[in-house]
Amino acid sequence: MKAKLTGANPYMPLWEHIPDGEPRVFTYNGETRVYVYGSHDSIYTEYCGYDYVVWSAPADDLTKWKCHGVCYRATYDTPMYAPDVVYKDGMYYMYVAEDRGTYIYVAKSKTPWGPFTDPVLTDLKFDPGVLVDDDGRVYAYWGFCESYAAELNDDMATIKEGTLVEHLIGHADSPWVTEREHLSDDDAFFEASSPRKIGDKYLLIYSKRHQQDMPELGVYGPNFGFLSYMWSDTPLGGFKRGGDISFNGGEIVPDVSRGGKATPDGIDGRGLMTFQWGNNHGSLMKVLDQWYIFYHRQTGIDEFSRQAMIEPVDVAIGRDGRPLVGRIRYENGEPVESLPVEMTSQGAYVNGIDAYLEISAGYACHMYDGTCDSVYTVSCPGGISQVARDRNDEDLRAIARRKMVIVPVYTPDSGLSDEMFKTLKERYADGLKGITYTDFDIDKKPTLVYDTPGEYSSPIMNIADGATIGFKYLQFGDKGPKSVTVRAMKMRSGDNASAGNDLRINVRIDSYTGDIIGSVEASVTDEMIEYTGEVTASVTGKHAVYFEFVSGDAGARYVFDSFTFD
């Protein structure tokens, strides 16, 4: 039996759902590891859950993640939002967002994985991020649609008198905003404050709610799928615009029907997202000699099954002293601009994922339905399907019927994955008319056994004729494969009965319209089965790989579970 891929993007097991991840590098008992502290999407019908768990990886291999188990449980009978952890004077401090972020407590532990105990109520509010500066002074940042910062006293809980800064940066406009004086389309602070320091420059990483259209990224209207930053020479003021570090809308492809073109620097003109964007939260961390951005993505069915992601980023200082973070553009050898890094499947596998492993379809970073009308223009929860239903708009509903989703795994022991799969099939079979987005059994909690978590695939469903599923990037080595095997099934038939069950899956490289290196001919049924085809072209080294589904039945829908090369 082949080994299964783990530790890519998402970098935690596919059954784990840890959004809002704050990465920290701690050395404990001589071992340096990267620890991630996030909330826990385990309720299914709203954000987050009732416990925090800690995951870590050795600093020299960010593909080998270990779970340390539960480190803190909710005091109230309500979900906890995003935490943060810092180390000071021999103690680890966790900032706990109790009661949906209403009350911020600080708890302590002598180890980076907890348990964190003795919680004390702080003066902080929603989404706290904390910085222990080089001189030992401690600064906190927080806020939802309004940005605040202050220096903390030695108790790590209360604000030092005279240091509170209100409206540290300008905030975005949104339905939740009542304060109008400090609106700023440039700053557009939304939430997710996370302070970092690069050299002597202070950075505030945060979720930015872009107000204007960004056609090169396929963004039209307000969008908060970005992690962005501002920077300053001081910790409590003077912040200037930095840039965008990451965007969780998947690979951006050119909207060729409207004149979009691919260039080495991105898209010229109009682009299209190929993944369901949604709220973003995470931060920047230097691990050994490389900087990384930690963020999260959606699965597409709602916004309550988010998954932890990681990408390497470049860091440079511009001629004007501005720190540049992300994908850096140079002019005449000088760094002049930072752009969002691409969203990949490989994550920390910087040389590409081993193509000869068994790879779950759930690692895809590109799910494109093949049309010029992107199904991802609206955010979760619900996305375009919910908008179509609310408006009773048949044109939108027709687009929504082509939306692909990654089925959250949780654990098979809970029975929830089977229930989700069945409900999602019903949802799409009835044309997205009757089934709501909160219809899963909320009394059925997943059985998360952290000492024996298992390895499970996370399939992509509702794949239509002409759709492509893409992975950036795979590593084929020096010899190249002879065959490709996919595991797939038919979800439902369409109106063209004469098409039968015939399906061809083309394997393309480097682009979703790139060269075909092989094909799988299959007579698919409603049973998940492996199908093998020949690789007819020589392919070695590192490539993006796309699976194109071609069917004579435009109304048919398919499920893609996993693949491998031999």
Image (spheres, grey):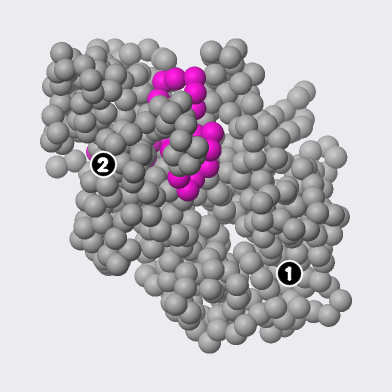
Q: Nearer the viewer, residue 442 or 25?
A: 442
Real-space Cα separation, disc 1 to disc 2, in angstroms: 50 Å
Which residue bears the numbered disc 1?
A: 139
Residue 313 visible in the picture: no
Task: Say which residue appears at 43% left-offset and 28% top-offset.
Answer: 394
The quarter of the image holding the C terminus is top left
State if disc 2 and disc 1 touch (CB < 8 Å): no
Residue type at mark 1: give it.
Tyr
The quarter of the image holding the N terminus is top left
Figure disc tally: 2
- Within 10 angstroms of label 1, few (less than 14), some, or many (20 or more) residues? many
Task: Say which residue appears at 69% left-offset and 84% top-offset.
Answer: 155
Task: Say which residue appears at 50% left-offset and 62% top-offset.
Answer: 38
Magenta region includes residue 383: yes
From the viewer's perspective, tell me whether residue 457 is left or right of residue 315.
left
Q: Which mark is residue 426?
A: 2
Magenta region includes residue 172: no
SS type, badge 1: strand
Residue type at mark 2: give it.
Glu
The answer to whether residue 443 is above or below residue 271 is below
From the viewer's perspective, tell me whether residue 383 is left or right of residue 486.
right
Q: Which residues are magenta?
A: 357-385
From the viewer's perspective, tell me whether residue 562 is left or right of residue 374.
left
- Within 10 angstroms of label 2, few (less than 14), some, or many (20 or more) residues? some
